[in-house]
Amino acid sequence: MPTQADKWRRRRIHKPSEEGERMTQEMQKPNADQARDLLRHTVATLAYRAGKALRGAPAHFSEFRPAETSRSAGQILTHLADLMDWALSIARGKEEWHNGPSLSWEEGVRRFFASLQAFDTYLASDSPLEAPVEKLFQGPVADALTHVGQIAMLRRLAGAPIRGESYFRADIVSGRVGLEQTPPKREFD
């Protein structure tokens, strides 16, 4: 049976000191530039995934909705652009929400990518971020990723599915935020 001294020694060996724990946390916490770079990569990931979900949608897809009370695919696309406009306003320290106009599918896609480009351009600049990177991620960017997934699912429900892909292998690069992206490296059905 272990003695009290044995238990104490084991705790000392297996439990890091407060100083060691603090140093580990400091080393793991990214600096502001690293966090901003990661957010830019996330925005490029959003562009890549959105490009795949938005390209080649059938003509009727903008009006498609799985239920009467659901948003249509076109309304979700408008919301995606609104989110990127909101993200930019937050980054600039002038948070404003505007409901964008209802547009054709092609115009909505152009508006989304123009808004995404404006946000990424601001992130790439030396202009200060007036909100924490984490808040920009957890709010508008994460919400946009969710809605891109909804559009991908709506494509399948509308009979126009996109192909599955290993996004881990995708060639996603910070700053590449337009509709045109590199071809997929590994797709599957």
Image (spheres, helix red, strand yellow):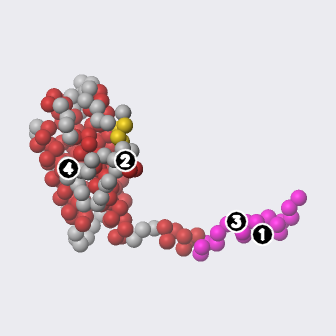
What segment carries the magenta color?
Answer: 1-20
Q: Does 84 appear in magenta?
A: no
Distance from disc 1 to disc 2, alpha carbons, whole Å, reads 47 Å
Q: Is residue 17 above or below residue 46?
A: below
- The residue drawn where x is 49% and y is 71% is 27
Identify the image quadrant of the N terminus.
bottom right
In the image, which disc is placed on residue 167? 2
What residue is pinned by disc 3?
A: 14
Q: Position of residue 128 (x, y in %)?
A: 25, 70
Gap between marks 3 and 2 measured at Cα: 38 Å
Marked residue nearer the N-terminal end (1 or 4): 1
> Tag 4: residue type?
Glu
Crowd band around label 1 with a 10 angstrom C-alpha radius: few (<14), some (14–19), many (20+): few
- The image's mark for residue 71 is none
C-alpha distance separating marks 4 and 2: 16 Å
**For mark 4, what is the residue?**
180
The amino acid marked with disc number 2 is Tyr
| Front label number (1 vs 4) | 4
Horizontal and vertical percent for residue 6? 82, 66
Q: Tell which tag, 4 or 3, sits nearer the viewer.
A: 4
